[in-house]
Image (spheres, helix red, strand yellow):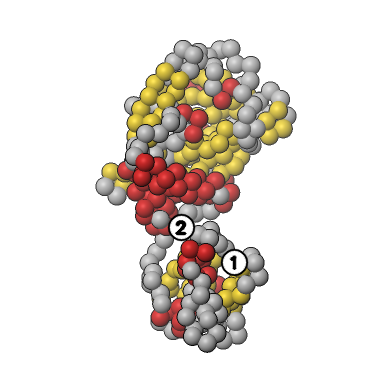
Amino acid sequence: MSDKQEIYEDKNEYLRVYFKTTGQYSNYHYFWLRHNCACCAHETTRERILCPSKVPLDIRPREILVQENKGIRLIWEDGHVSDFALDWLLEHAYALDESVTDIQAQNLAHIAVQYDDCKDDFVAICDRYLNEKGAVLVRGCTLDVDALVAYLTDEVFVLRDSHFGYIEDLRTDNTTNKNTDQLGYTNAAVNLHTDQPFIEHPPRFQLLLCVQTADEGGENMLADALQAAHYLRDLDRVAFEALTEIPVVFHRNQKNFECKTRYPVLSFDADQFRQIRSSYFTLAPQTSSFGQMTQWYRAYQLFTKIIEDPAHQFRVLLQPQDFVLYDNYRMLHGRTTFSGGRWMKGIYFDYQ
Ligand SMILES: [Fe+2]
């Protein structure tokens, strides 16, 4: 650890400061630090002249410096400089030794396996990755989707039907599925979401097998809602409660299919994460109370900002014979816009 890291860590949403003298640490919101800037006081009375209402909640420093006396200097975007002595920070610590669950960096190596390296224990390895990491990326498996399904459903998994059929052809000229009037069959970007939140029991797992890559674009993204939910709970308890307690209406309304449910975005059993339901393209006009509406939108925007942080996402350009398999109750998925004949086969599974 460098000397600098021993003193502070920029956690993006907040600053963590380490106090060598006591062996403790504390977290400080950047807006709190900006508001408590020592020089923002009247020159003779020393009264604070900066009102908290004037500090943007998303304020971030442009630069963080350690001073020779081991204090911390923050240089804000507008050039304003705030100096904090470590003794002062310790004296005013409001989150001493309080941990905030970090989201692990989403490195593809964490979920990727080569089919040839795991084919003897293939299904068990997929199941283990799903349990531990929420997703698995298998490289170089097969183009034979029927054989793959037979393999996976021999034990552990069972195939799951949907309102568009058993095997979905995600391509722009799809004619093989029922109810093709949905974003998945266009070349539009599809931002992070979960599938089928509008039915009572959404499919537990989705597999996307790459048959053909796009000429350009068409990357897949995955984000871990379990980690993001724990992070949100520590970062902003009110936002967390809005997403776990305020139900929202999901409504799939197609030409020949309609289904509606009402659930919170995040579901927990006591302290245990159970499920996320999130799909901006099937959200109906919401009907929560007037006072809750602001709270829910604010919370949803904060949660989306967390999961859309590139550091919190897996991004992969699948090649033919590669597939991703993920837990639709835990992982959000999406894809970037593309051109050309991109073709993925989508299949849902539950546990047997
Ligand atoms: Fe989807």
Amino acid at circle 2: Asp
Q: Residue furthest left?
A: 270
Closer to viewer: mark 2 or mark 1: 1
Residue 35 or residue 49, whichever sits in front: 49
User: What's the mark number on residue 61?
Assistant: 1
Amino acid at circle 1: Pro
Q: Quadrant of residue 2?
A: bottom right
Asked if the residues shown at circle 2 and circle 1 are in contact, with their CB atoms under 8 angstroms apart, the answer is: no
Q: Do we see residue 6 in this rendering?
A: no
Q: Is residue 239 above or below residue 318?
A: below
Q: Quadrant of residue 183?
A: top right
Residue at 44%, 36% (x, y): give it.
278
Q: Is residue 150 above or below residue 81?
A: above
Where disc 1 sits, the SS reads strand
Percent coordinates x, y for residue 186 in the rendering: 61, 23
Q: Residues within 10 Å of mark 2 (few under 14, many from 20)?
A: few
| Image side of residue 139 versus residue 206, left or right | right
Q: CB at mark 1 closer than 8 A to ligand 1?
A: no
Residue at 29%, 49% (x, y): give it.
271
Q: Residues within 10 Å of mark 1 (few under 14, many from 20)?
A: many
Q: Is residue 85 above or below residue 269?
A: below
Distance from label 2 to label 1 (Cα)? 20 Å
Where disc 2 sits, the SS reads loop
N-terminal label among 2 and 1:
1
> Quarter of the image containing the C terminus?
top left
Percent coordinates x, y for residue 92 in the rendering: 41, 77
> Quarter of the image containing the N terminus?
bottom right
User: What's the mark number on residue 102?
Assistant: 2
Residue at 39%, 39% (x, y): give it.
265
